[in-house]
Image (cartoon, rainbow, N blue to C red):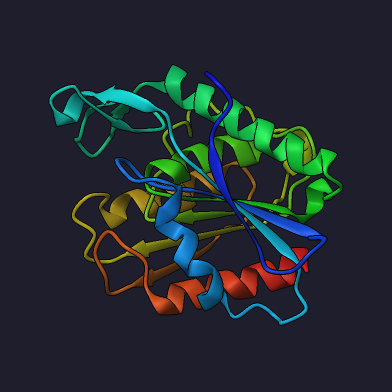
Amino acid sequence: MQDLQYIEVETRANPTAAVIWLHGLGASGHDFEPVVPELGLPGDAAVRFIFPHAPNLPVTINGGMTMPAWYDIKAMDIDRIVDTDQLMDSARAVGKLIDQEIERGIPAGNIIIAGFSQGGAVAYELGLTYPKRLGGILALSTYFATAKTVRPSEANAGIPVNIYHGTADPMVPETLGVRSVAALKDMGYDPAYMTFPMEHSVCLEEVQDIGRFIRKHVL
């Protein structure tokens, strides 16, 4: 996979922390750019937000139409048949963005990986396997597609994980969020799980809690 294109937003000059935030199927890095001012971060917080654009791929469930996607979804049943090789490729490509932030002077422990829907599945894979300790994982309205195959790194044992889900989500049923929590607990993690009365989206209360997570773990 080629290097990812992305949008970069800095809350102040000389950032000391970074959040790499992955969008969902058919979207772009612009999707979550407007969220930054709503996070309630301190005025002196210097955080760099990276919003990558997924590559264009044919997506089976959409009739093979080419669209921004982190991987192909071959069936939309509850178990989600996905192209795991493409998911792993995307995780490696986003991992290069983490490497880049470290090279720019931000410690790995001050970097959070966040993802919505498809992006969240990539965030799980990357956040748990990255060889250096990261600041945390934020999983929004998503599912743990590689729960049976992931090989977590020792560095990220016990990494903070917050999972958010809508109780009326018709695209990614809340059952999949609950399954993610169970899978992570079986692996020895202690994820926090929050639900909101919404569909496949985000809400202000969720965004505000994400802001608290950022303040707690990387600021």
Residue 78 visible in the picture: yes
From the viewer's side, name the closer residue of 134 and 150: 134
From the viewer's side, name the closer residue of 173 and 47: 47
Q: Is residue 82 above or below residue 137?
A: above
**Can you tell which quarter of the image residue 140 is in?**
bottom left
**Can you tell which quarter of the image residue 39 is in?**
bottom right
Q: Decide if residue 198 is on the left or right side of residue 31.
A: left
Q: Residue at x 59, y 34 (%)?
A: 94
Residue 129 visible in the picture: no
The x, y position of residue 81, in whole percent, is 28, 26
Q: Is residue 30 above or below residue 214?
A: above
Q: Decide if residue 92 is on the left or right side of residue 197.
A: right
Residue found at the very far left of the displayed protein: 63
Q: Residue at x 73, y 42 (%)?
A: 156
The x, y position of residue 68, in whole percent, is 34, 34
The x, y position of residue 36, in whole percent, is 54, 68
Instruction: Count every numbered label the image shows and give the total.
Output: 0
Q: Is residue 189 above or below residue 26?
A: below
The x, y position of residue 98, in whole percent, is 70, 39
Q: Is residue 71 above or below residue 7?
A: above
From the viewer's side, name the closer residue of 195 and 51: 51
Q: Residue at x 63, y 41 (%)?
A: 127
**Can you tell which quarter of the image residue 192 is in?**
bottom right
Q: Quadrant of the C terminus?
A: bottom right
Q: Decide if residue 65 is on the left or right side of residue 56.
A: left
Q: Residue at x 52, y 22 (%)?
A: 89
